[in-house]
Every structure is written in C-alpha cells, then in structure tokens.
Amino acid sequence: MTLSTPRRYTDSVRIGPVVVGSEHSVAVQSMTDTDTNDVEGTFEQICRLHRAGCRIVRVTVPGMREVEAVRVIVEQVRRIFPDMAVVGDVHFLPSVALALAGVVDKVRINPGNYSGGEDFVELLDRCKATCTAIRIGVNHGSTGGRDMVDYAMEYLRVCRRHDFDQVVVSVKASDVGVMVRSCRELVLAMDAEGMPFPLHLGVTEAGNGLDGEVRSAVGIGALLVEGLGDTIRVSLTGPPEDEIPVAQAILQACGLDRSRAEIIACPGCGRTLFELSRVLDRVKREFGHLGGIKIAVMGCIVNGPGEMADADYGYVGAGRGLVSLYRGQSVVRKNLTEREAIPALVALLKDDGVWRDSS
C-alpha cells in the first residue's frame, strides 16, 4: 500500500537520537503515567515502552523537584536505551521548561503559560544553546476559547523571528472532527507562511479499548493518508505500552510502516474450506515478524487470487482441509494439507530470500 497523497515536506527536527520530519519514518511516542519522582517506577515503565517499540517517551514535569528526577531518568535511558528520546512535559511554569533545556531531548510546552513575549524567547535561546527541541502543544480544552490554529501560529511566528527551527507543533482535541479539521487548517496556515515544521498527531482523551482505538485510528489515520503527520501518539486509558501496537497498526494500515508482515484475510463465508480464524492466528504467529511482505489468507479459490491481487504471498483454501500457496498471482504449491502448508510457506520464503528467524 502507498499513501494516496505524498507526505507533506517538513524539515528535520532532532530529538536526541530520533529525527522526525518527512525524510524519516513517522515516529511513535507515548507518555508515562507514573509519579515522575518515582524514578525506579518511571524507568521500569519506560523499559516496557521500549520493548513495545516506543522510541520517544514523554514524562510529566510539574515542578523543579521533578526536574532532578528527570535528570536521573534521562541518564539511565541514555545508558540503557541510546536509541530512545526523552521529552519533558511542562504545563505550568516557564521556569521549569528553562531548567529542562539540556536535560531532556525535547521540551513540550503549553502556550497558555506564556505571554508570547520574553519568557518564551528566553526558552528558545536556551534550547538553541543546548540543542534541545521544542513541541508547541495546543490542546482544545486549554485555549481559553481561542482558536487553536491562531494560537499555534502565534508561537511559530516567534520561533521563525528568532531563527529557531527545531520545533514540532500539535493541535489536539478529544473530538475527532475538531482534531482533523484543526490539523488541516494549521498545515494550510504554516504552508502559507513557509513554515515546514513537523506535525505531531493525536486524539486526546480517546478512552480505552475498542472505542479509544477506533477514535485514534479515524483521526490519526485520516491525516496520515493525506500525507500529514511526522510523529503520533495513541492516547489510551490504561498501560501506556498498550498504545504502541495500536499506533504501529495505524501506521501499517496507512502504508507507513513495513517493519512487520502485513497479513490480510477474507471474512469467511459458506465457501471457506478451513477454520479461518485459527489459521489466521497461526499465520500471524509464524510470519508476523517478517517486515516488508504482505500475506493473504483466503478461505477459498473464489476469493483467493482475485482479491489478494496486491499480496506477495497467498495461503488459499483449495479443497476441504487443503491449501494452495501462491507467490503473487501464481500458484506454486497445490493441495497441501494444513500440516504441510505452514512449513511449505516457510520454505518458499527461504527460497525467495525473505525469511528470517524471529528474535
């Protein structure tokens, strides 16, 4: 799958070891929900996030006490996970943002805590001197009634006047329609003033379970397929590491992540010639780790070759309990038993040089 619209060009912004922008992969991030002063508990959660595939982690920093805790956490992350960036989230005190510059890789600020004047300029100067990125994060619920796009543009113009380009911007809302519309309007406003700043996407307060996943997929996915977005967060209620596979699935569905196999399947019908859900689960277990390929599991020959036209390989019902394997549109093994089919598909992938053992 390819994007229906090419990605919008954005400048590269370095967030410690991670670089975001249109020349780089869309980065997945999350946020810890521990007390930041609990250094051990926060770091343990960061470990779980890293294992899940998160490479940008945000921690809340409400005051100066937490700045010192973050300093210790960042030292641990840089020692153990040198490929992971740490972001300090500041909601209230500009002095805390200043103290974080040079400690974390990026400072996320709430524009509502600045006047747009000298205190924000002081932060830009400090971040420029310490090679610290900034995210200007505007949330719909904290604008005091102001238009989110106008609010964000006010601060982006200050960045431009002071020659600060290591900035990422976001406009978020819990209402999916408001979030999508605001992001589109922000991009139009930035492009009109020649501001190719990277865009962070997310639906705030998305909820949990299926509701949260669908709301996030609709909002984030709608923009990604339009070529918008350089980093994303799926904000779910629950363990933050649960956000990462959902974010990765959204990226894969939008054609932006091929680090795992894309495995598709027909829904099944009266023609299905094997227990589709059981076979699909096994194919996912055996082949899901293979990046860059697409495998179709199809229940019968009627839906097989035609509807899996863009798949690299096919596992297709050929008769009751029998399977044929396809490479693209060409059948390569016919009428295998289910016991034979999986090993035969492994052998086919090895012959084609795309197999690798799971880690």
Image: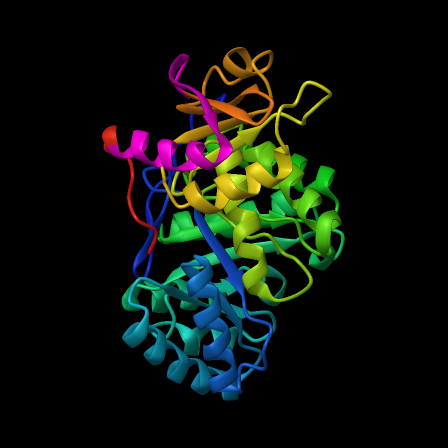
- Write down the region rendered in magenta: 326-350
Number of marks in the rendered image? 0
Q: Is 1 left, or right, of 162 in this rendering? A: right
Q: Which of the 4 image quadrants contains residue 6?
A: top left
* Residue 38 on image: x %, y %: 53, 87
User: Eyeballing the image, is 38 above or below 306?
Assistant: below
Residue 183 colored in magenta in the image: no
Q: Residue at x 64, y 49 (%)?
A: 172
Q: Which of the 4 image quadrants contains residue 272?
A: top right
Q: Nearer the viewer, residue 258 or 299?
A: 299
Q: Nearer the viewer, residue 314 or 153?
A: 314
Q: Residue at x 45, y 29 (%)?
A: 295
Q: Is 117 left, or right, of 101 in this rendering? A: right
Q: Which of the 4 image quadrants contains residue 348?
A: top left
* Residue 164 on image: x %, y %: 36, 53
Q: Is 43 left, or right, of 171 in this rendering? A: left
* Residue 26 on image: x %, y %: 42, 43
Residue 190 in sight in this render = no
Residue 345 colored in magenta in the image: yes
Q: Residue at x 29, y 60 (%)?
A: 17
User: Eyeballing the image, is 182 above or below 107?
Assistant: above
Q: Nearer the viewer, residue 300 or 338?
A: 338
Q: Quadrant of the C terminus?
A: bottom left
Q: Is 63 left, or right, of 126 in this rendering? A: right
* Residue 7 on image: x %, y %: 43, 30
Q: How is the image coloured?
A: rainbow
Q: Residue at x 57, y 34 (%)?
A: 223
User: Eyeballing the image, is 110 above or below 223?
Assistant: below
Residue 321 in sight in this render = yes
